Image (spheres, rainbow, N blue to C red):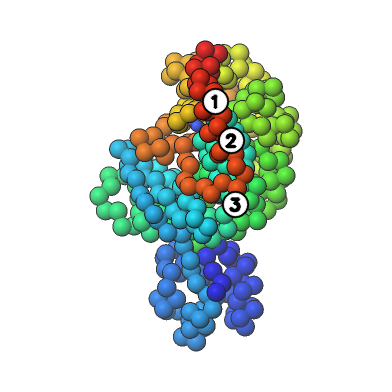
Amino acid sequence: MINLLGLDRGQLQQFLIECGEKPYRAVQLLKWIYERGVDNFDDMTDISKNFRSHLKNHCSIQTPDIMSEHVASDQTRKWLMAVPGGNLIETVFIPEAKRGTLCISSQVGCALNCTFCSTARQGFNRDLSAAEIIGQVWKAQQRLDSVTDSPLSTKITNVVMMGMGEPLLNFESLKPALSIMRDEHAYQLPRRRVTVSTSGVIPGIDRLIKECDVSLALSLHAPNDQLRNQIVPLNKKYNIKALLDACRRYTAQNSRYFVTMEYVMLKGVNDSILHARELAKILSNVKCKVNLIPFNPFPGAAYKCSSLEHIKSFAKVLTTKGIVCTTRTTRGDDIDAACGQLVGKVIDKTKRSQRMLKQQRTAPDRVSNAEST
Ligand code: SAH
């Protein structure tokens, strides 16, 4: 059985040619599957009966299963979705009055090891397929369509690749999924409303520039290599200078393009006025906006969130230096659906989760150590 979910327009055309069908039927399939949310070939009435029965016999539209749903007091919804292999991934919907942002996962767990992220502690199992990535959007929209009592938007207007995993380490699956989000016959999302967030995988950024037209967010989190090496270990491979060069290649594509710099506010670690000045300096010649993210705690975390006052003064330094800066409002934290709190259930192949637990048991005072810095 071929799962048609996750094939973008080009791949569907290829599939149709192989079936001896006209490639323009790809548009019909995209409309049925994504625009109308249909997963039953019998309902696809503008497709010939013969071809429908061929599809029924050889193909499926296989979406992930929602295993549980949690609704936060602010209407943020978190779903645990099952994907083959006994793993659970997390998908979060953040509604506003006229906007709905879906935060989706790209991998089961994460192979990187950012010290402030709870997904990192789960270790890594595998990449998600394109079907499993776009399937989160499909399933979320199907579920949201049946919600009738929400005062806020139930339409997905934005998608951010900010769930579990590092999207640019799973480029092969990411690419068709992004293409389906953007396709005028599928989810029809404008470039500005599809965001890939990366911890800084430079070859992936360069492929994104060439192959996918979407918004880019960089998890910067520190203004110098010494500090970034500690909290985002990938920095030892791709340092800040090289990263900012990659950002400049991205923004050079179009005068309207900019990069969103994400900066998690860790009390006593990266949140001083000096850090803010250093950040303003390195960003002075990059077209970007800074998004300060209050640190979201999780059990066993070695950090605390900076105080609101601290965040405000940090932001003021940046805006005074002419850098547009916003502070992310924490949503869904009462159901552990906020940034860096997504953990799902990862059958960890790296054994990192076990090592972490052991470390925590032998060094239970890590939290108080961080507090006193
Ligand atoms: N791997 C990608 C996308 C996933 S994380 C990346 O690193 O960008 C999405 C954002 O949430 C990133 O900026 C990440 O650094 C941030 N984040 C992770 N843990 C967090 C936490 N505990 N509190 C606040 N933000 C966190």
Residue 355, which numbered label? 2
Q: Is residue 37 visible?
A: yes
**Dot placed on the residue nearer the N-terminal end, 1 or 2:** 2
Residue 205 placed where, x, y %?
A: 68, 43
- Say above or below: 333 vs 152: above
Name the amino acid, label 3: Arg
Residue 309 placed where, x, y %?
A: 44, 15
Count of number-bearing discs: 3
The residue under label 3 is 126
Q: Quadrant of the C terminus?
A: top right
**Dot placed on the residue nearer the N-terminal end, 3 or 1:** 3
Horizontal side of 57 relative to 169 (left or right) equals: left
- Say above or below: 242 vs 186: above
Q: CA distance from mark 1 to mark 2?
A: 11 Å
Q: Residues within 10 Å of mark 3 (few under 14, many from 20)?
A: many
Residue 74 placed where, x, y %?
A: 32, 38
* Label 3 C-beta lies within 8 Å of the nearest ligand 1 atom: no
The residue under label 1 is 362
Tag 3 and tag 2, C-beta contact below 8 Å: no
Name the amino acid, label 2: Arg
User: In the depicted view, which residue is nearer to us: 119 or 363?
Assistant: 363
Q: CA distance from mark 3 to mark 2?
A: 19 Å
Q: Quadrant of the N terminus?
A: bottom right
**Dot placed on the residue nearer the N-terminal end, 3 or 2:** 3
Which residue sits at x=53%, y=55%? 133
Q: Residues within 10 Å of mark 1 (few under 14, many from 20)?
A: few
Horizontal side of 98 relative to 206 (left or right) equals: left
Q: Residues within 10 Å of mark 2 (few under 14, many from 20)?
A: few
Which residue sits at x=34%, y=45%? 70
